Amino acid sequence: MGGVIALKRVKVTSKGQITLPKSLRKQLNIKEGDYLDVSIHSNNLLLKPVPSQDGTKIIKEHCKQYCSDRTTLEETRQILKKIPFSLSERTGILREK
């Protein structure tokens, strides 16, 4: 890992949550709703931002996994219901960008 490592102290809440300082979120371009991969290395907790994907790309990957070449409109609707996020919520996020 190159670059300067920013040392910040955060407090763990009763529910096990932490708040990432704004300066770190800005530096790493982490926004509300983004995901972080969490791992342990040599007894250290490592948080790594997961690159966000374009909504269209996510839907295509999901459909590739669950669709055949000749999927009907109704089958497509059923597949889209299984997408692990709200399409309207995701659309709103993409519009903000």
Image (tube, grey):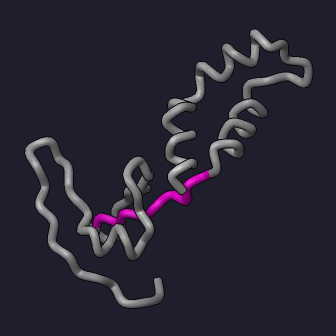
Counting every numbered tag in the picture gives 0
Residue extending farthest left: 14
> Relative to residue 66, is residue 40 depicted above or below?
below
**Residue sitting at 50 percent across and 46 percent down?**
93
Residues drawn in magenta:
45-53
> Relative to residue 49, is residue 70 depicted above or below?
above
Indicate left or right for 48 with 81 as reference.
left
Which image quarter: residue 48? bottom left
Q: Position of residue 33 (x, y in %)?
A: 41, 47
Residue extending farthest top: 74
Which image quarter: residue 8? bottom left
Q: Position of residue 91 (x, y in %)?
A: 57, 40
Nearest the camera: 43 or 87?
87
Q: Position of residue 67 (x, y in %)?
A: 79, 24
**Residue sitting at 85 percent across and 22 percent down?**
68
Nearest the camera: 90 or 76?
90
**Residue sitting at 29 percent across and 75 percent down?**
23
**Residue sitting at 56 percent across and 48 percent down?**
95
- The quarter of the image holding the C terminus is bottom right
Magenta span has 7? no
> Relative to residue 60, is residue 94 depicted above or below?
below
Q: Position of residue 38 (x, y in %)?
A: 38, 56
Nearest the camera: 21 or 94?
94
Indicate left or right for 60 with 40 as reference.
right
> Relative to residue 32, is residue 29 depicted above or below?
below
Residue extending farthest front: 95
Indicate left or right for 31 with 12 as reference.
right
